[in-house]
Image (cartoon, rainbow, N blue to C red):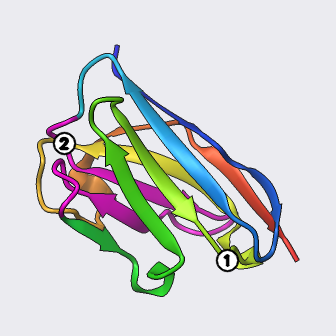
């Protein structure tokens, strides 16, 4: 059974940092593009970042560049999201996703086949 399990969320003060992890099991995702999305209450799911299988190609939503960094460890079948200088507007459930087969990092949720259950990130002011 394929699973993506996020961890590392929690409550943090504005200006703080968190590192999210997404561990994959059931199969290797070393050939897949992996992405992070988030969804705040009452809002649609939005793209955060994505990384191609090699780690050499990444994509970010423009407003998060410089604060968020995506990386991956294929040997550990894990993808990470380092979040710095967090703001209250970063509060959301963060989801990990894997695409169908190693395409260019895409901001479109429809390009991703596998999804985790999400981890809550709450940033207090």
In the image, taking residue 52 as reference, residue 83 lies left or right, namely right
Image quadrant assignment for residue 58: bottom left
Q: Quadrant of the C terminus?
A: bottom right
Comparing labels 1 and 2, the label whose residue is closer to the camera: 1
Circle 1 sits on which residue? 85
For label 2, the SS is loop
**Position of residue 77 measured from the top left corner of the image (x, y, whole percent):** 33, 31
Name the residue at the right extreme.
125
In the depicted view, which residue is nearer to us: 88 or 41? 88
**For the residue carrying disc 2, how many other residues have a C-alpha within 10 Å: few (<14), some (14-19), or many (20+)?**
many
Which of the numbered marks, if any, corresponds to residue 36? none
**Position of residue 8 measured from the top left corner of the image (x, y, whole percent):** 65, 44
Circle 2 sits on which residue? 32
Instruction: Give yes or no for residue 39 being in the magenta stretch.
Output: yes
In the image, taking residue 119 as reference, residue 59 lies left or right, namely left
**Looking at the image, which residue is at 32% across and 60% down?**
50
Image quadrant assignment for residue 59: bottom left
Image quadrant assignment for residue 87: bottom right
Instruction: Give yes or no for residue 66 being in the magenta stretch.
Output: no
Which of marks 2 and 1 precedes in the sequence? 2
**Looking at the image, which residue is at 59% across and 53% down?**
19
On screen, 12 above or below 112? below
Magenta-tinted stretch: 30-56
**Position of residue 61 measured from the top left corner of the image (x, y, whole percent):** 40, 78
Q: How many marks?
A: 2
């Amino acid at each position: 059974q394929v699973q993506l399990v996020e961890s590392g969320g929690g409550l943090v003060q504005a200006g703080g940092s968190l590192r999210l992890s997404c561990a994959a099991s059931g199969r290797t995702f070393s050939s897949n593009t992996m992405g992070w999305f988030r969804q705040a209450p009452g809002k649609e799911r939005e793209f955060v970042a994505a990384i191609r299988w090699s780690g050499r190609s990444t994509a970010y939503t423009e407003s998060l560049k410089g604060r968020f960094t995506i990386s991956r460890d294929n040997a550990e079948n894990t993808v990470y999201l380092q979040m710095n200088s967090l703001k209250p507007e970063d509060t959301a459930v963060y989801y990990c996703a894997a695409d169908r087969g190693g395409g260019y990092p895409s901001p479109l949720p429809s390009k991703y086949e596998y999804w985790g259950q999400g981890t809550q990130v709450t940033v207090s002011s």
